Image (tube, rainbow, N blue to C red):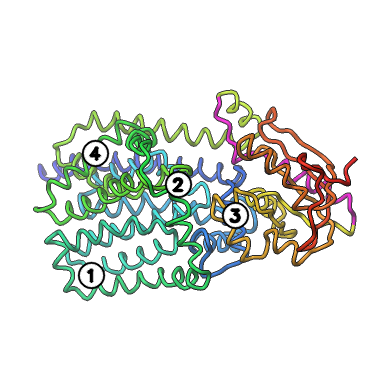
C-alpha cells in the first residue's frame, strides 16, 4: 500500500509536466498553422517553390530536400500557402516529439518534458516549420543523428539506422550539414566510447546510408562545374577576420533569450566535464559544443552580410537533452529554469505575434511604425494583383512577364501558380544570394531571355526599393540596356513608400543589339 502511494506520488509531477508540454505543443501548432496559411512567402521560400516545379538531383543554392518536400506537400494538399508549407509544419511538430522520446529513453519522463518544452519555448525552435525552409529538414536530421548516436554508444543496434537516415537527410537538406560532422568525428576519434564503435558494422552501415544523401549533391556539382559548392564555400565568404563576429554570443543570447542561453551552455559544459564517465554525456558534449564553437569560429571569418543566427540551432537539441537530465537529477535550480523558460516563452510569443502581424497589411503598417517593417513578407499579393490587371488588358496576346530580380520573379511565379513563369533580369541580388547560376541553368536569366525571346513584347515588373539608394540608381539606369523601348505603365507605392513597384512595357532586344539609352540618365531614346 505504501509502495503504491509512493509510486503515485512520483508519477504526479511527471504527469503534470506531460500535460504542460502537451498543452503548449498543441497550442503552438494551432498558431503555426494559422501563420503558415496566411503569411505571404518569404523571398527565398518562393524560390524554393520554383525549384519544386523543376525537380532535380540538386540545385545551385541548396540540395533537393526542400524542393521535394514542397512538391509533395502541394501534391497532397494543392497549391496554396498551407500546401507548400504542410510537410515543414509536420516536421516542425515532430521535432519536439522526437526530442521527448529521446530524452525519455535516456533520463525519464520528467526530463523528457523539460527538454521538449524547452524546445517549444526557444523562439527559433518553437516557430520552426512555419516557413518552407531548409533549416526544418536539417534540424530534424540533426536530431535523428543525435538520437542514433546516443543509442549506438549504448550498443543499441537500432541507433545505426537512425544515424544513417539522419546523415542522408542532412546532406539532402543543406550544405550546412558539414557543420554537424566534426562533432561526430571528434567523438569517434577522441572519446573511448566513440573509438570502440570503429569495430561495429553498424557504423559503416550508417556511413554508407549517409553517403546516399551526399551522392546527388556531388553528382550535381560535378556536372555544373561545382557552382553550388563554390558559392557556399568560397563566393559568399570573405575569409578574412572581421571583429563584428565576436558579437555572435550576444546575438545568440538575444535569439535564444539570455537566461536560457546561459543554462544551455552550462548544461553542455557539465556534459563536457562528465564525458569521461558517461557515454551519454560524451555524445551530448561533442554534438553540442562542436556546433556552438564551430559556428563561432566560422563566423569570425565567414559571411557577415546574410542572416545566419539560426545556424547553431542543432546544438540546442543536445543542450536541452543535457539540461533536462541535469534538472531532474535534483542538482539544478528549478526556479532558475522556470524563469528562463518563462522569458523564452515570451520570446517565442513575440516572434509568432510578429509573423501574425506581418501576414496582414494593417499589421505590417503598424510594425513599420515601430521600425520593424517586415519587408520580405509584404507587398507580394498587391504586386501580383496589379500585374494580373495589366496582363488582362492585353487580351488574348499577353506579353512575356519579366521581373527585375529573382525574388520578385519567384513571388510572381508562386502567385500565378507557374502558369506564366517569369524571366529575371541579371540583378546583383541574384549573384549575392547564389541564384544566378540556377536561373542560367533554367535559361530564365537575361541571356536566356535574349536567346529564346528576341523581339517579343514584355511586361517588366521592377522592385524600386531593393538595395541601397546608390544601388537602386545604378540599377534603374541600367534597365534600358536590358529591355528595349521601355515605357512606364504604372507605379504602386505601398506602406508609405517603403515598397515601390513599377511596371514597364518593352521589347526583348536581340543578343547583340546595342542598348537603347539616352546618355547618363538611363532613359530610353524612344521615351518622350
Element carrying mark 4:
helix
In the image: residue 385, left or right of residue 234: right
Say which of marks 1 and 2 sits in front: 2
Up the image or down, 205 lies above or below 317; here it is: below
Q: Earlier in the sequence, mark 1 or mark 4?
A: 4
Q: Which residue is mark 4?
A: 13
Q: Which residue is mark 3?
A: 47
Disc 3 to disc 2, C-alpha distance: 19 Å
Magenta span: 371-395
The residue drawn where x is 48% and y is 68% is 221
Q: Earlier in the sequence, mark 3 or mark 1?
A: 3
Q: Earlier in the sequence, mark 4 or mark 3?
A: 4
Disc 1 to disc 2, C-alpha distance: 30 Å
| Residue 239 x/y as whole percent | 39, 49
Say which of marks 1 and 4 sits in front: 1
The residue drawn where x is 79% and y is 62% is 510
Q: Earlier in the sequence, mark 4 or mark 2?
A: 4
Q: Which label is found at residue 128?
A: 2
Say which of marks 4 and 2 sits in front: 2
Q: Which label is found at residue 157?
A: 1
The residue drawn where x is 41% and y is 45% is 310
Element carrying mark 2:
loop
Amino acid at each position: 500500500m505504501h509502495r503504491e502511494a509512493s509510486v503515485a506520488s512520483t508519477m504526479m509531477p511527471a504527469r503534470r509536466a506531460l500535460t504542460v508540454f502537451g498543452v503548449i505543443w498543441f497550442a503552438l501548432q494551432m498558431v503555426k498553422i494559422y501563420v503558415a496559411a496566411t503569411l505571404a512567402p518569404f523571398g527565398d521560400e518562393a524560390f524554393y517553390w520554383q525549384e519544386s516545379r523543376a525537380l532535380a538531383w540538386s540545385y545551385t543554392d541548396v540540395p533537393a530536400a526542400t524542393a521535394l518536400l514542397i512538391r509533395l506537400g502541394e501534391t497532397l494538399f494543392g497549391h496554396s500557402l498551407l500546401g507548400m508549407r504542410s510537410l515543414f509544419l509536420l516536421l516542425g511538430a515532430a521535432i519536439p516529439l522526437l526530442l521527448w522520446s529521446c530524452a525519455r529513453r535516456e533520463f525519464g519522463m520528467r526530463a523528457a518534458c523539460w527538454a521538449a518544452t524547452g524546445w517549444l519555448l526557444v523562439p527559433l525552435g518553437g516557430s520552426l516549420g512555419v516557413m518552407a525552409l531548409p533549416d526544418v529538414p536539417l534540424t530534424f536530421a540533426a536530431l535523428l543523428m543525435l538520437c542514433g548516436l546516443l543509442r549506438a554508444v549504448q550498443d543499441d543496434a537500432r541507433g545505426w539506422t537512425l544515424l544513417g537516415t539522419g546523415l542522408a537527410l542532412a546532406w539532402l537538406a543543406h550544405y550546412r550539414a558539414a557543420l554537424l560532422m566534426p562533432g561526430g568525428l571528434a567523438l569517434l576519434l577522441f572519446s573511448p566510447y566513440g573509438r570502440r564503435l570503429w569495430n561495429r558494422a553498424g557504423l559503416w552501415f550508417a556511413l554508407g546510408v549517409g553517403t546516399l544523401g551526399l551522392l546527388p549533391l556531388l553528382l550535381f556539382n560535378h556536372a555544373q562545374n561545382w557552382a553550388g559548392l563554390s558559392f557556399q564555400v568560397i563566393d559568399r565568404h570573405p575569409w578574412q577576420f572581421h571583429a563584428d563576429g565576436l558579437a555572435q554570443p550576444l546575438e545568440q543570447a538575444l535569439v535564444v533569450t539570455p537566461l536560457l542561453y546561459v543554462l544551455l551552455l552550462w548544461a553542455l559544459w557539465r556534459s563536457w566535464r562528465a564525458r569521461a564517465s558517461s557515454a551519454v554525456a560524451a555524445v551530448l558534449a561533442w554534438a553540442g559544443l562542436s556546433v556552438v564553437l564551430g559556428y563561432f569560429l566560422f563566423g569570425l571569418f565567414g559571411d557577415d552580410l546574410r542572416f545566419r543566427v539560426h545556424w547553431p540551432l542543432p546544438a540546442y537539441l543536445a543542450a536541452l537533452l543535457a539540461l533536462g537530465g541535469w534538472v531532474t537529477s535534483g542538482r539544478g535550480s528549478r526556479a532558475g529554469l522556470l524563469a528562463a523558460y518563462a522569458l523564452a516563452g515570451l520570446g517565442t510569443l513575440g516572434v509568432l505575434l510578429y509573423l501574425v502581424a506581418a501576414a496582414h497589411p494593417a499589421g505590417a503598417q503598424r510594425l513599420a511604425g515601430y521600425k520593424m517593417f517586415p519587408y520580405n513578407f509584404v507587398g507580394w499579393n498587391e504586386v501580383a494583383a496589379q500585374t494580373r490587371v495589366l496582363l488582362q488588358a492585353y487580351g488574348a496576346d499577353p506579353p512575356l512577364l519579366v521581373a527585375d530580380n529573382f525574388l520578385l520573379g519567384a513571388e510572381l511565379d508562386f502567385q500565378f501558380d507557374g502558369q506564366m513563369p517569369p524571366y529575371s533580369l541579371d540583378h546583383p541580388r541574384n549573384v549575392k544570394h547564389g541564384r544566378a547560376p540556377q536561373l542560367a541553368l533554367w535559361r530564365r536569366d537575361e541571356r536566356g531571355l535574349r536567346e529564346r525571346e528576341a523581339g517579343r513584347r514584355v511586361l517588366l515588373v521592377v522592385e524600386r526599393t531593393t538595395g541601397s539608394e546608390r544601388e537602386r540608381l545604378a540599377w534603374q539606369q541600367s534597365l534600358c540596356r536590358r529591355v528595349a523601348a521601355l515605357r512606364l505603365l504604372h507605379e504602386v507605392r505601398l506602406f508609405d513608400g517603403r515598397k515601390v513597384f513599377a511596371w514597364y512595357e518593352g521589347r526583348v532586344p536581340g543578343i547583340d543589339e546595342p542598348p537603347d539609352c539616352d546618355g547618363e540618365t538611363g532613359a530610353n531614346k524612344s521615351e518622350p
